[in-house]
Amino acid sequence: MNDGTNLRVAFAGAGLMSQFHLNGWSEVDGADIVAICDPTAEKAEQRSREYGIPAVYEDFAQMLEQTKPDAVDIATPVDTHADLVRIAADHGVHACSQKPVAPTVAEAESLIADVGERVRFMVHENFRWRPHYLQMREWLDDDRIGRITHARMTVRSPGLAPSDDGSTPPDLVRQPYLATFKRLITFELLIHQLDVLRSLLGELEVVSVEMDRVNKDLVGEDIAIIVMRGETGITVVVDGSMSAPGYPARPSDRLELIGTKDTMVFDRDKLFLVGSDAAPIQHDLMANYQACFTNAVKDFANGVRTGEPFWTDRLDNLKTLQLMERCYEIAGVGA
């Protein structure tokens, strides 16, 4: 659509992450959130009051039938994504779904085939939209470090770390269901970093994987070390732990890109070139966190309006999901 009228957007989900999506939509010119849906009506009503959303529903299909939106933003639990995208496609409504669009590659491929070209379909994978990673992409385009020879991403969080006093780890207080996930840190967190690396370095192949559990109360892994090979032969390592005491509550990234001319480093909130005397560029992580949601919904809105490709189109995001699933295959962990 590109007829000058406002984009009518429905919203699904009123949980923790919905606020960041809705904050993002408030920055999109010419878009109106016309309805919100959640099985828990009280949550949807609260978001309706906070963001001035005129209609509240408990039933997703009913919301689409009655409000007839152009597009829907889906921010619901992962096991609901595929069904809701299918319902949207059946109603002729363009869909943006939180990542991952389905728990497995097979389910994602089935969904993509079912939707076909009936509607536009984007996956809300937003880490690559974070301003510090966008700036790294600009520096690569400007040839600041030459040809990349090696990359290492380190991710740390204390969120699942067991405590001596037996108290519940903070991530399990907020999201207790994580304790039951058979596939945990790579599925829930590192899939973001894998997508960032794809966006910066091109396609990657998994060479080896080690997974372990520090917190023995978990079903899935809270540590993963992934070694990959890039298309040009470069070695890429991801080293993640969600049981790392002392780190800030929000997961911290350190990405080092070693090139033939210099080395570029993003370390938690600072971006710099190792061989430069220039002061590191300071990034506001909370502002960047919201910015990646805002940038993603703006890309979705623009694509729906103009027909331009989404940066995280469902076919592009399928490659990230395939990369994540390959990690578990090599580690011998089933779905």
Image (cartoon, rainbow, N blue to C red):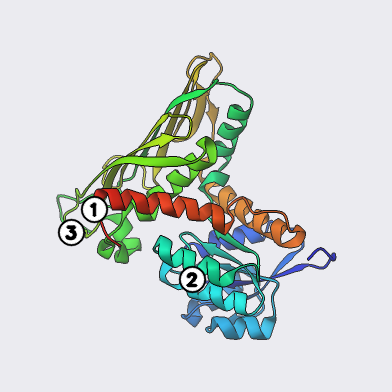
Disc nearest the viewer among 1 and 2: 1
Q: Amino acid at mark 2?
A: Ala
User: Disc 3 marks which residue?
Assistant: 217
Q: As rendered, which of 92 and 204 lies closer to the eye?
A: 204
Give coordinates of residue 1: x percent, y percent: 78, 66
Disc nearest the viewer among 3 and 1: 1
Q: Residue 90: which numbered mark, if any?
A: none
Q: As rendered, which of 97 and 55 lies closer to the eye?
A: 97
User: Disc 2 marks which residue?
Assistant: 82
Q: Quadrant of residue 153?
A: top left
| Mark 3 neighbour class, 10 Å CA radius: few under 14, some 14 to 19, many 20 or more | few
Against 223, residue 17 (above or below) is below
Give coordinates of residue 240: x percent, y percent: 32, 42
Disc nearest the viewer among 3 and 2: 2
> Which residue is found at the position 44% from the left and 34% from the top?
230
Q: Are marks 1 and 2 in contact (CB under 8 Å)?
A: no
User: Disc 1 marks which residue?
Assistant: 332
